[in-house]
Image (tube, rainbow, N blue to C red):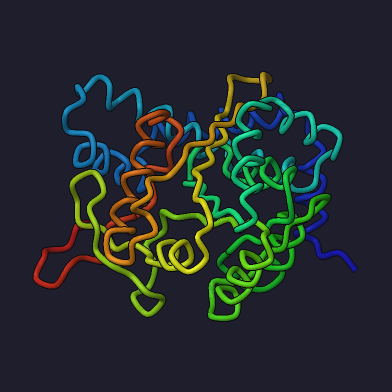
Amino acid sequence: MRTFLEIVVRLLGNMPLAIARLVGWLLGLALTATPNKFRKISNLHLARCLPQTTPESRRKILRDSLFASAHAVTEAPAIWFGSLRRRKRWISTSPDQLAKIRQAHASGRGVILLTPHQGAWELASFFCAQVAALTVLYKPQKGNADALLRNGRARGAEITPVPTSGKGVKALLTALKAGEMVGILPDHDPPEASGTLFAPMFGIQTNTMDLVAKLAARTGAPVLYVVAERLPWTQGFRFHVLEASAEIADPLRGPAAMNAGIEQCIRMLPGQYWWSYRRFRRRPQGEPAFYD
């Protein structure tokens, strides 16, 4: 039996993209026009991460980013529970980029796909799953939201969500050894117990997962970054696939190489990045708190 939350999200999923974008625009307008924590944190990040840009440029990135975050929320139901035919149309726009994933998958060693919180990141896994079976790591949610998220992220595609736990990591390794693909959101602030190193990101020492480096070193799987660019209004989406540095498979230098690749993605489309996420909460011993 469907829960009330699932019924609401499925109904929202049937909204036309134009309506979802309009609702997102109104939410973004509220975020840009009123004092709030998302705006405050984004301002701090832009000042510290992009100090070389002009104040005018940072204001534009801030505005664009808040609108992009709002659109990510209002588009998610459509991506998860909307028309499969419509979603197929959305992910059929960048055959040249999909060919890069096919080429990497042809190695037979599996593929590690890294999707930063940028653009329409919820759509990126469906784009990638056109090539082969995909196992994606996700953070379990409380209550009914967990099943809703898992069902939405797997609906209509050969995608298997697994939790951020030892069991989930084992599932990723098993998938890679079978020549399949795995997907990871690489720009979280992970708990130290999960395996982390401090590595630079925008010149700031950043608590960074070492999972990608370990998986790449153990399996020899190629690593790619995937960004789903959101195009204006009803124009849909465009995908970008970037090859990671070979250093990403180094147990010690891998986290820094991964962060450098994330930076490259962000600089490509800075206005579509999730600047409001508290990425620098954990600090090296002896450093002052990053946030108030």
50 is higher (above) or lower (below) than 130: above
Question: Residue drawn 17% across and 68% down?
Answer: 284
The residue most toward the right is: 1
Please state the horizontal and vertical placement of residue 130, each as a whole percent of the image: 75, 43
Please state the horizontal and vertical placement of residue 129, each as a whole percent of the image: 72, 47
The residue most toward the left is: 286
Please state the horizontal and vertical placement of residue 59, each as a whole percent of the image: 30, 25
230 is higher (above) or lower (below) than 56: below
Question: Residue drawn 80% across and 53% down?
Answer: 155
Question: In this image, 191 relative to 133: left or right?
Answer: left
The residue most toward the front is: 107
Residue 127: quarter of image: top right
Question: Residue drawn 80% across and 34% down?
Answer: 88
Question: Residue drawn 20% across and 57% down?
Answer: 205
Question: In this image, 84 relative to 272: left or right?
Answer: right
Please state the horizontal and vertical placement of residue 137, each as a whole percent of the image: 58, 64
In the image, 249 versus 209, the foreground residue is 249
Give the quarter of the figure containing the C terminus: bottom left
Residue 97: quarter of image: top right
In the image, 34 versus 291, the foreground residue is 291
In the image, 188 versus 147, the foreground residue is 188
